[in-house]
Image: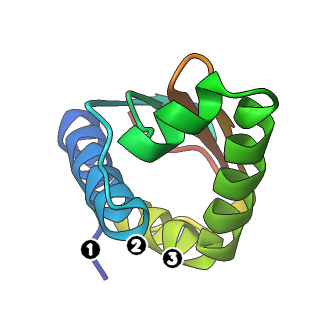
Amino acid sequence: MEHLQGNSKSLKKNIEDSFKSFMAKHFNKGPLLAKVYMVDNCITIYCKEVLTPLEKNIVRENLGEYYVQIFRKKLSYSSGDILIGMIEQKTGRKVNTFFIDCNAVDDSLCCVFIMEGNIEN
């Protein structure tokens, strides 16, 4: 098991890279930007420019943003075990709660993990 707790900068970078790879593999497009924030027992991943060209076209249509959000949320939660495992492996901590949401209009995504115990900074 890979634990990177000692250096929060390398842990954040490692999580960013792993999350980008996850998105590229499961959504056929990685985000242009992935930024990790760690405070106490919370890890937040903010991504920008996550939508595929097809999704961007759908968002322009009537109710398109809702269809994209529903599809993204369903796909994200069905892959949730992979994301949780990735975070647990990188931090050496158990994930207690996981939340992900996509803003189709803003072309952004936010993923939050509440950990069992604080993350060392």
Q: Is residue 15 above or below residue 94?
A: above
SS state under label 1: loop
- What amino acid is found at the position of numbered circle 2 in the picture? Gln
SS state under label 2: helix
Determine contact: label 1, label 3, CB under 8 Å. Answer: no
- What amino acid is found at the position of numbered circle 1 in the picture? Glu
Task: Report which quarter residue 12 is drawn in.
Answer: top left
Which residue sits at x=25%, y=31%? 32
Which residue sits at x=78%, y=27%? 62
- From the top left corner, tell me how far across and down residue 95 is, in percent: 65, 63
Q: What is the distance, in whole Å, between disc 2 and disc 3 at their CAs?
A: 10 Å
- Taking the image as shown, residue 18 lies to the left or right of residue 52, namely left
- What amino acid is found at the position of numbered circle 3 in the picture? Ile
Q: For the residues carrying marks 1 and 3, which lies nearer the camera in this image?
A: 3
N-terminal of the pair, mark 2 or mark 3, is 3
Instruction: Say which residue label 3 marks.
Output: 82
On the rendered image, what quadrant is the N terminus found in? bottom left
- At label 3, counting other C-alpha atoms closer than 10 Å, the crowd grade (few under 14, some 14-19, many 20 or more) is few
Instruction: Say which residue label 1 marks.
Output: 2
Return the residue nearer the eye: 116 or 52. Answer: 52
Q: What is the distance, in whole Å, between disc 1 and disc 2 at their CAs?
A: 6 Å
Q: Is residue 33 above or below residue 3?
A: above
Q: Is residue 111 above or below residue 87?
A: above
- Taking the image as shown, residue 103 lies to the left or right of residue 21, namely right
- From the top left corner, tell me how far across and down residue 23 is, in percent: 38, 57
- From the top left corner, tell me how far across and down residue 42 is, in percent: 62, 38
Instruction: Say which residue label 2 marks.
Output: 89
N-terminal of the pair, mark 1 or mark 2, is 1
